Image (spheres, rainbow, N blue to C red):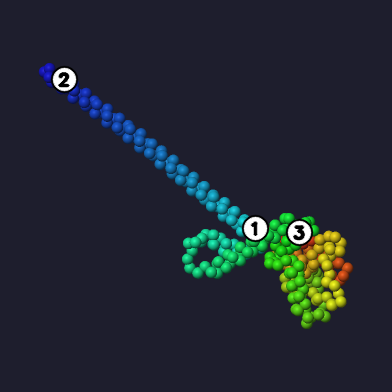
Amino acid sequence: MSHQEPQTFNSGAKTLRLTENKRRYRARRKEYIADLETKLAEAREQGVQATKEVQLAARQVALENGRLRDLLRLAGFSHGDIDSWRDAGCRGNGGDGDTSNSSDQHFQTEQKARRCAAALAAYQGADEREWMMPLCEIACGSEKGLVKTIEAEKAEKAEKSSCTRHEQIIPSCKLITRLTENPAADITQVPAAAPLSSNEEPHQDAGASHGGGGIECRKAYDMLIQYATTEDKMDTIARALESGCTKNGKGGCAVKSKVVLQALDDVCE
């Protein structure tokens, strides 16, 4: 009997230890599973938040790209110029296929950007009396200087008007008068005025004889009419050209610089 009692006691203690170990194991497993479920829920929440942030960032990038594209359009770049520049940057050295056309357009876009940058730098550093020149170059997208452009236009006008020298042509600045006489007239296709006779001197800008800033009416028309994309813009340009026109005393006329600038601001908005 004395030997059986210790064996029974040891067996009962062992059973208690096993039971306690199982209880602790189940408790630890339950705690571990609960911790995993908590972490999984947090990960899902973080994933949802990250998705929202990515979508918000994508919308912001799209908005910024759209505004930058609008700015480049105002600077004179076409959608084709912008797309070719973007595609060249995305393609890098890993592009395949014939890329000669896109490369040519990319080069032309780069040259246009350099000309705009040079004109803008000249505008920012120019004297107050000279600042109109780079602005005209930017607005017209001219590759040559303003003086060369005017001379080329005068030569072209002389050739085209040789057969209509004696016809009466309404000046390009009198668009409202033209529309009043002919409501169906296309003011975006106004013929150049007849050239001066050989014994007359080419007139200067109206503002030049008065110390102010003026732009030859035909030049002002060419600057503004390229932005006449809507009927409202056409009306704005017509009013600006006719109301800002001043005579120079030599049979010619010019539009005040401030009027042209204000019209550019209005139609470029």
Front position among marks 2 and 3: 3
Q: Amino acid at mark 2?
A: Pro
Kindly indicate the quadrant of the structure image that contains residue 157: bottom right
Q: Which numbered circle lies on residue 21?
A: none
Question: Can you give x and y, in whole percent of width and height, for residue 44 in the image?
Answer: 44, 44
Q: Amino acid at mark 1?
A: Leu
Q: Which element type, helix, strand or loop, lies under badge 2?
A: helix
Kindly indicate the quadrant of the structure image that contains residue 172: bottom right
Question: Can you give x and y, in whole percent of width and height, for residue 19 in the image?
Answer: 25, 28
- How many other residues sit within 10 Å of disc 1, few (<14), some (14-19) or many (≥20)? few
Q: CA distance from mark 3 to mark 1?
A: 21 Å
Q: CA distance from mark 2 to mark 3?
A: 113 Å
Q: Residue at x 83, y 71 (%)?
A: 202
* Residue 179 visible (yes or no): no
Front position among marks 3 and 1: 3
Q: Residue furthest top?
A: 2
The disc, 3 or 1, on the residue closer to the chain's N-terminal end is 1
Label 1 sits on residue: 71
The disc, 2 or 1, on the residue closer to the chain's N-terminal end is 2
Q: Which numbered circle lies on residue 131?
A: 3
Q: Amino acid at mark 3?
A: Trp
* Residue 65 visible (yes or no): yes
The disc, 2 or 3, on the residue closer to the chain's N-terminal end is 2
Question: Can you give x and y, in whole percent of width and height, for residue 140 in the image?
Answer: 70, 65
User: Which of the two residues, 185 or 212, is positioned nearer the viewer here?
Assistant: 212
